[in-house]
Amino acid sequence: METNKNYFEEFEHIFDNEQKCIDYLYNLRWEKGWKCLRCSHNEHWKVGDMKYKCKKCGYQSTVISGTLLQRSHLPISKWLKSAWYIANETGCANALEMQNMIDLGSYHTALSVLNKLRTAISRCEKPKLKGTVIVDDVFIKSDADGFPYHTYIAVENRENEYGQICMELHSQTDYFSFIKKNIAIGSTIRTNGINIYAKVPEKYYLTLIKRKSGSKMLPLIEDVVYEILNRRLLGGRQSSCSYLNYDLCLEECCYKFNRRNKNAKFIFCEILKGMMY
Ligand SMILES: [Zn+2]
């Protein structure tokens, strides 16, 4: 296993001490100025490296109070470095790799950090798919011997190209709920028309498509699944993708797929913002 990656050089350069990391988080959290968590007053005394006391009510809070990081004992630099890792990895993040590269102590800690970051990802903006959307269910194996995960998948069909995608575990939702939650009303749903796919909820339109001969999947969905596997967005890194947290893993996969044109710094910043409440 690689013990370091090039992209950390830039991280070490920008965030060369703990205080810079705290300041970065502070500015991200209070873009519009500091606010007391209890009374919303906007003036404070700094009473510790990342601790602030409200000048009006005396309430003390830290840069991580009331956020996903609350009660974390890890240095802020490790959180930032973990977010940097996720933002720079095109493939699915791996807890074991994080434990070693970011020196997170135990595998348990690394997995907990990873799942918090994935929770932050799940809070990021997720516009509903719209226009013409192909919907089906697929079995995706996390690796050759892995358990195949049965998931609903929806892919925006933009002039024979794919747009945004969305996936959810088949066992955790039903077909109509999946559509209503993830696809905008008025969209046209394209399916194979078999069984549950013969109908759509009210206010959606239905058109049918066929698989290409020799293929097990609908057009475009097949391309997306190949790209997901090629980019290792799910495949081959299942040590952090147990069935229990697979839904969070799917969140990371769709998030990265849908931001394939964004750069790592944008993703880093967006994930951290997702952690700040
Ligand atoms: Zn206050």
Image (cartoon, rainbow, N blue to C red):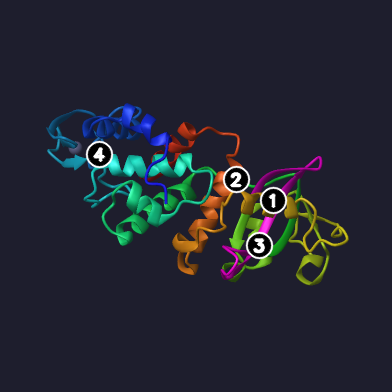
Please state the horizontal and vertical placement of residue 23, each as a whole percent of the image: 26, 30
Disc 2, ligand 1: is the CB inside 8 Å? no
Q: Amino acid at mark 1?
A: Val
Main secondary-structure element of the magenta-colored stretch: strand
Which disc, if any, is residue 152?
3
Q: Amino acid at mark 3?
A: Tyr
Which disc, if any, is residue 224?
1
Mark closer to the chain start, 4 or 1: 4
Q: Amino acid at mark 2?
A: Phe
Please state the horizontal and vertical placement of residue 258, each as a whole percent of the image: 60, 43
Quadrant of ligand 1: it is top left
Q: Amino acid at mark 4?
A: Val
Above or below — where is 153 with respect to 31?
below
Disc 3, ligand 1: is the CB inside 8 Å? no
Circle 1: element type: helix
Circle 4: element type: loop
Please state the horizontal and vertical placement of residue 233, each as a whole percent of the image: 56, 51
Q: Which residues are magenta?
A: 140-165
